[in-house]
Amino acid sequence: MAISRVTSKGQVTIPFEVRKALDIEQGDDLIFEVRKDQTARLRVVKRRKLSDFYGALPAERPFPGKEALREEAGRELGTRQKRSNS
């Protein structure tokens, strides 16, 4: 059994053996579900990196490069600003 103490700021250090057993890593979110009988359920939500989603959606066009995207975004923002000023 692992024990941890709550600080004055409501913070708790999760003991190593609990982190290991639940595969809790830095950046993960924890969801606390409090029940009427004063028990709680803890769920770990893993954070995913944006790069994990690479290739998840089909490309509609080939990647033109960063500079071309920046220019396109700049043109679009300029067009929007002109519309909002008129």
Image (tube, rainbow, N blue to C red):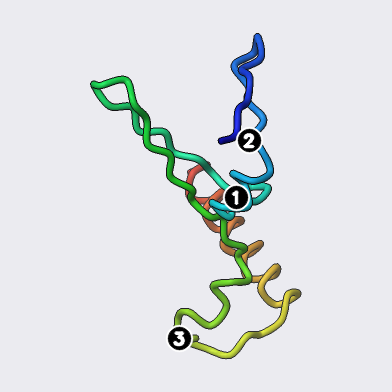
Q: Looking at the image, is mark 1 or mark 3 earlier in the sequence?
A: 1
**Amino acid beneath label 3:** Pro
Residue, x 71% and y 81% (percent of image)?
A: 65
What number is the disc on residue 58? 3
Residue 10 spot, x, y in % from top left: 59, 16
Left or right: where 56 falls relative to 65: left
Q: Which residue is mark 2?
A: 14
| 53 shown above or below 13 | below
| In this view, 46 is above or below 12 | below
Residue 74: x and y, percent? 66, 62
Q: Nearer the viewer, mark 1 or mark 3?
A: 1
Q: Which residue is painted at 67% across and 30% down in the image?
A: 13
Disc tally is 3
- Residue labelled with disc 1: 24
Q: Are marks 1 and 3 in contact (CB under 8 Å)?
A: no
Residue 58 x/y as whole percent: 45, 86
Q: Amino acid at mark 1?
A: Ile
Front-most of residues 61 and 35: 35
- Crowding around mark 2 (Cα neighbors within 10 Å: few <14, some 14 to 19, many 20+) is some
Q: CA distance from mark 1 to mark 3?
A: 32 Å
Q: CA distance from mark 2 to mark 3?
A: 41 Å
Measure how far apart labels 2 and 1 are at the Cα level.
Answer: 9 Å
